[in-house]
Amino acid sequence: MWKRAGEEKNDGGHWPELHVMSTPGERLRATLQQAAALERAGCFDDAANYWLAGLELARHGNEQHWCEVRALLCQKRSAEPRR
């Protein structure tokens, strides 16, 4: 469902940095770093998807709130006309 810009899945069906042996915290960190990078690059649709994935991985209320707010912001920016 979520894809890094210009990257394909490996044979195991997982993104390279999100392998089966990753801890939940590592998966969350990698997901949020990718979301932030996509947001900085102006890829708001993709960034919103990563923030929503982070929302599912987050265990603490403040992490969940941050992911939800960032996803909503990216969705709003995506809907704005390009200048």
Image (cartoon, rainbow, N blue to C red):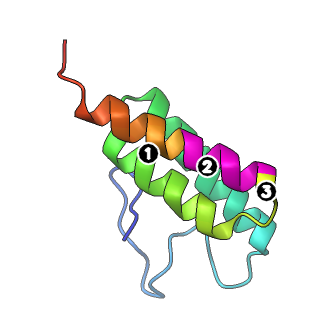
Which structural element holds mark 1? helix
The Cα atoms of the two marked residues, 2 and 1, are separated by 10 Å
* Residue occupying image coordinates x 40% and y 73%: 9
Q: Would residue 38 be seen by someone viewing this image from the given angle?
A: no
Verify CB contact (< 8 Å) between mark 2 and mark 3.
no
Q: Residues within 10 Å of mark 3 (few under 14, many from 20)?
A: few
Looking at numbered disc 2 in the image, what kind of residue is underneath it? Cys
Q: Which residues are magenta?
A: 62-69
x and y percentages locating residue 82 in the rendered image: 19, 20
Looking at numbered disc 3 in the image, what kind of residue is underneath it? Gly
Dot 2 or dot 1: first in sequence order is 1
Task: Name which quarter of the figure residue 4 lies in.
Answer: bottom left
Which structural element holds mark 2? helix
Please name the residue that numbered disc 1 is placed on. Answer: 47
Please name the residue that numbered disc 2 is placed on. Answer: 67
Task: Name which quarter of the figure residue 66 lies in.
Answer: top right
Dot 1 or dot 3: first in sequence order is 1
Considering every residue shown, the one lying at the far top of the view is: 83
Verify CB contact (< 8 Å) between mark 2 and mark 1.
no
Q: Quadrant of the C terminus?
A: top left
